[in-house]
Image (tube, grey):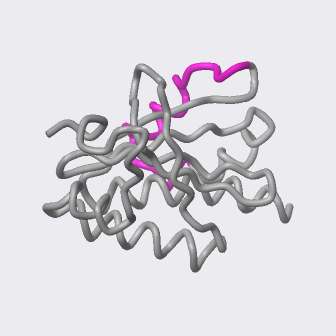
Amino acid sequence: MEWKTLFPKNHQPSLEEIAEYIGGEAKPLWESLLEYMDKTYKVKPKLTYSVCSGKPGWNIKFARGGQSYGTLYPEENSFSVFVVIAYKLDPFMEGVLPRLSEECAERYRSAGDYMKMGRWMMFQINDQAGVEEYKNLVSVKAYSKIA
């Protein structure tokens, strides 16, 4: 059953229900990423409902102190992440690009403009490599706060 149908706006899922929906090999990736974000950045998942035509339904936002670390969208056997890298972080990204796969680095280089704020990327995560790509991207946001 489709995510937005299974959990309409008036039926907020629990984190456990989200993990069960994702299922398969992606479920432990999802759970480990939530734990990583909590331990590393002290960011708790916030459930929000989106009516966006691209990915309608319940999603998870990571934000703390005005800093957005991205939005995660549950899918069957995977999940997608939406992250915006502000233009002011381009110098920090130069240090991260060598740690990214060529595909992810190219995704960053060709990323679209998000409301004149930065480069926006959305990609699917269904393996550990995808999780690592996301971790590298959000590390720039955290590093910029202390630089």
Relative image position of residue 1 (x, y in whole percent): 14, 40
* Vertical order, 85 against 143 (above or below): above
Q: Is residue 113 part of the magenta span, yes or no?
A: yes
User: Which portion, as a residue range, is magenta?
Assistant: 97-115
Q: Is residue 48 magenta?
A: no
Residue 134 or 13: which is nearer the viewer?
Answer: 13
Task: Find residue 80 and report its horizontal and vertical position in percent.
Answer: 37, 43
Quarter of the image that includes the C terminus: bottom right
Residue 20 or 144: which is nearer the viewer?
A: 20
Residue 60, position in %: x, y?
49, 52
Instruction: Left or right? Give the position of 48 relative to 130.
Output: right
Q: Position of residue 145 (x, y in %)?
A: 82, 59
| The residue positioned farthest toward the bottom in the image shown | 39
Q: Which residue, as the protein is rendered here, is positioned at the far front?
A: 10
Q: Residue at x 74, y 52 (%)?
A: 67
Front residue of this view, candidates 125 and 27: 27
Quadrant hosting residue 29: bottom left
Residue in the image at 35% along x and 53% along y:
130
The single residue placed furthest to the right in the displayed view is 147
* As drawn, 146 above or below 144: below
Please tell me which residue is depicted at 84% across the width and 65% down the height of the picture.
Answer: 146
Position of residue 36 in the picture relative to residue 142 (left or right): left
Total of numbered circles in the picture?
0
Q: Name which residue lies at 57% across and 47% down.
A: 70
The image quadrant that residue 27 belongs to is bottom left
